[in-house]
Amino acid sequence: MLALGIPFFWNDNDHRDHLDTNGFANAFIFEKWNVLQETKTLPGVSVDAWYYFASGDSNRMGAGSHSWKFTAEISKAWKKVSVHLNPAYRTGSSGGLHMIEGNAGILYQPCKKLWPAIEYNYFRKESKGSRHDIIPGIIWKFRPGCSFKVGPVFTVDSSESYRDKVGLVMKLFASF
């Protein structure tokens, strides 16, 4: 599965620095390969390769250079609920970006089109610190292969030099 993602963020930052802005982050594409098919009792495992374009504004939410992210995805779905765990490593073209990421989520599927979800995200950026976020949100499956995700970002803990007071993330995904 090849997919395109376009993220947009609103945020308000504690230190009122140059990151106290809104804007598009770097658009990305990713390819997913299923390694182990999910069964009735065992989770599925897949690996992803993500490419982030140098499309973000480095004075705002994005970066002026491209980067790569490699992810393992462990997921299990039942009739109305699914869970996932995604450890990842991200590296940038400028050589200065080395990031460990972790994502865990629970999705509730009460109907075909709208899925409430809650995610936990962990980021550890070399020489910049780490951050723990909780994102409750909703995923709208508005047509086959396409989804729109929106949710507030609550930073629970951060050792980074900046910390978002308020955040909102929106992502548009389209698979090909």
Image (cartoon, helix red, strand yellow):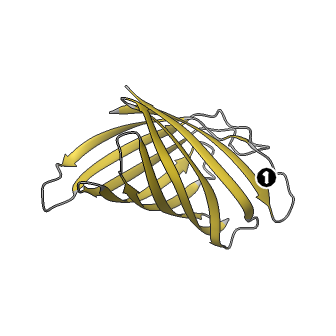
Taking the view exactly as shown, the residue that stands out farthest to the front is 111
The vertical placement of 9 against 14, above or below, is above
The N terminus - image quarter: top left
Q: Amino acid at mark 1?
A: Leu
Residue name at image x 13 percent, y 62 percent: 41
The single residue placed furthest to the left in the displayed view is 40
Q: Is residue 88 left or right of residue 81?
A: right
Q: Quadrant of residue 44?
A: bottom left
The relative height of residue 155 versus residue 35 in the rendered view (above or below) is below
Percent coordinates x, y for residue 134 in the rendering: 56, 65
The residue at 12%/57% (across/down) is: 40
In the displayed image of the protein, which residue is found farthest to the right? 16
Q: Is residue 111 visible?
A: yes
x and y percent of residue 111 in the render? 35, 45
Query: Could you say where residue 117 lies in the image, as x and y percent from the top left?
Result: 45, 56
Residue 148 in the figure: left or right of residue 32: right
Circle 1 packing at 10 Å, graded few (<14), some (14-19), many (20+), is some
Identify the element where label 1 is drawn: loop
* Towards the viewer: 174 or 60: 174
Q: Residue at x 48, y 61 (%)?
A: 119
Query: Viewer-proximal residue, 73 or 126?
Result: 73
- Number of numbered discs on residues: 1
User: x and y percent of residue 85 in the render?
Assistant: 36, 61
Quarter of the image with the C terminus is: top left
Residue at the disc numbered 1: 19
